[in-house]
Amino acid sequence: MRYQIMSAALAVTTALPFAGPAAATDLEVTHWWTSGGEAAAVAEFAKAFDATGNHWVDGAIAGSGGTARPIMISRITGGDPMGATQFNHGRQAEELVQAGLMRDLTELATRDKWAEIVQPKSLLDGCTIDGKIYCVPVNIHSWQWLWLSNAAFEKAGVPVPKNWNEYVAAAPALEKAGIIPLAVGGQPWQSSGAFDVLLTAVGGTDAFLKVYRDKDAEFAAGPELAKVFKAADDARKMAKNTNVQDWNQATNLVISGKAGGQIMGDWAQGEFQVAGQTAGKDYTCLPGLGLNEVIATGGDAFYFPLLQDAEKSKAQEALAETLLDPKTQVAFNLKKGSLPVRGDIDLKAANDCMKKGLDILAKGSVMPWTDQLLSQDTQKQKEDLFSEFFAKPDMTVEEAQKRFADIVASAD
Amino acid sequence: MSKSERPNQLFRNLNAKVASVPMVLTAVVIFVGGSAWTVLYSFTNSKLLPRLNFVGLDQYYRLWSTPRWLVSIENLLVYGVLSLVFSLVIGFILAALLDQKIRFEDTFRTIFLYPFALSFIVTGLVWQWLLNPEFGIQGVVRGLGWESFSFDPLYNSDIVIYGILIAALWQGTGLIMCLMLAGLRGIDEDIWKAARVDGIPTLKTYLFIIIPMMRPVFITALVIIAAGIVKVYDLVVAQTSGGPGIASEVPAKYVYDYMFFAQNLGQGFAASTMMLLSVVVVIVPWAYLEFGGKKRG
């Protein structure tokens, strides 16, 4: 019960003025990119920013977004803002913007014609609140991927499935061969995300939007969603022996062939790359679970807290320009395994799975993701529900759907 | 005259009073003020930032209809009762055994107290490994030949809270043992001699003479254990992060998750107010009996 007191006390101590003149303008940038590939990617940003005559002060916060965001937010609300900070664009920083703590970038955006260079356009929508632009999108990460281990299917003696339905049908064979059909880690966001992917794949993009954008609780309780919950029930049965917590441990089960597959965002690709596996040969990726090939335009973006210091404000502008620079975009996204936010650059070095993603992007099959549509509060409730659903075999599909509809009804 | 005879109560020990002002202010502003602020804002719909937009009891209705909160309360009750009973019983038995003038008492005391030097996070991680079915106890026993042996509390929703309890007892009983030992040492030797002269068996001496005499020690131990129970958080985070599913969630974690991850301060405040209330419900009658009674008597 004392956490809020402690955080208030912390905020007071960190609010002490922090003075330190430096030759080049130091700009502290906080982010939660700490895994091997991520750190290499963010180093590209730092290099490019330092080349503009400023200095990138790295403020990496370990422990994924869930841990990092509260720290970033308490620094901004506590009066010790950093120069720039990562968030997933969408609604995570909404209230900070409304409270006037974030810098309005509209002027810069009009000058540099962001509206023309950022592709797809919906990315900028995620940064726009009341007609003003508050963030710089730097990459696109989509959730809708199924990663399959070719070795596991070979061992089970079944062909590598082409879509979700074939995969479900192949599950008994995998199980017989002592392989976990589907790896789902214990962290709540994984089961919740897997459900959202099933919703887009099995239910379709419209169903997804009806539930999460229009918050249609009646529809969420209806027969179409029942189909999706049936699929989630299949997934739950296939995943029941995954005794790991972290997503990359679950990915590792797929890499080592102990699990048949995993529903996970394209960030999982980095793990396959680090393990030296080749797309198509060692593993197969199915965007949209092979049923509905779309890409959600979630991803990472940088927000700039409103600063008093004119020097630093200028450095912020330089950083914003650097982030969208074509060269930085290529260097960063290749290392990160994500898709660039500009349509006018060439990613020759992209691997097969990234190329699939770029194709879908070029076709314009994009959709918004939950980060843009739902508040963190609603997302957390959803996570609680699905982590319980996946861990509790005796929870019925009907009960889960009813509770899901309740969450949708009270969603904001 | 009367003034010089009975100086104003306010100015007695003035130095001491001035010196304690900072602490009094801290207590009033931070503890009482912070708690009052929390309770006040629990009636608002504050999201990421606190806002005075009152919504009545909405946060509380939502709280008590949330399955995760109900699971948390149930876990806290199970964990609390068992942890209280086992800590006291095991702590006392260990202390009584150590009190038999055995050899190497210091060594044993150090061994038993040592886990207390570890933080809950470290304890949690250690026991996460020990209870891991592939690497821990189950793996070792299976490796010895009992193939069907199964002991994986952290991966079984029904018994996961006991897995956490084991770690908590391992960490905490050493301290209780030391408190009890100090209490036992405080008992006059003559009492033991008198009991022996009267021919009272050792067990009965403990139960009917020594334990009642150790009442203050038991109360201290009780308060320490109870405070540890209500705030249990880091152990759960390190061992299971609330899983599998939501089976090992505890109220403190609900508060933290909803305040910071879900960016819903109002909901987090409502939950923390309920925690405060539960402490008050236990502490106030007890404090009344314990301290109020003496004054009257």
Image (spheres, rainbow, N blue to C red):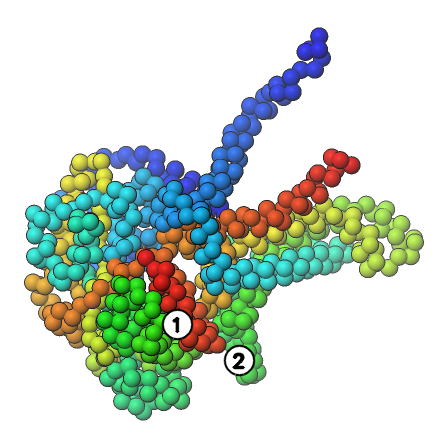
The residue singled out by tag 2 in the image is: B143
Q: Which of the pair B22/A90 is nearer the observer?
A: A90
The residue singled out by tag 1 in the image is: A401
Tell how many labels. 2
For numbered disc 1, what is the local secondary structure?
A: helix
Q: Which of the pair A47/A28 is nearer the observer?
A: A28
Most distant residue in the bottom direction: A157
**Where is residue A91, by image quadrant?**
bottom left
Instruction: Please rate how many residues cluster around mark 2, counting C-alpha atoms within 10 Å: few if below 14, some from 14 to 19, many from 20.
Output: few
Give the Cα distance between marks 1 and 2: 43 Å
Identify the amino acid type marked 1.
Gln
Q: Is A166 drawn above or below residue A110 in the view shown?
A: below
The residue positioned 54% from the left and 71% from the top of the image is B158
Q: Is B138 drawn above or below residue A367 in the view shown?
A: below
- The chain to which mark 2 is attached is B
- The chain to which mark 1 is attached is A
Percent from the top left, x then y, of residue B148? 55, 83
Percent from the top left, x then y, of residue A18? 30, 36
Q: Which mark is residue B202?
A: none
The residue positioned 20% from the left and 49% from the top of the image is A130
**Where is residue B49, by image quadrant?**
top left
Q: Is residue A123 visible?
A: yes
Of circles 1 and 2, the one toward us is: 1
Instruction: Please rate how many residues cluster around mark 1, counting C-alpha atoms within 10 Å: few if below 14, some from 14 to 19, many from 20.
Output: many
Most distant residue in the front direction: A218
Q: Is residue B236 visible?
A: no
Residue B249 lies left or right of residue B281; in this view the side is left
Identify the amino acid type marked 2.
Gly
For numbered disc 2, what is the local secondary structure?
A: helix
Q: Quadrant of the C terminus of chain A?
A: bottom left
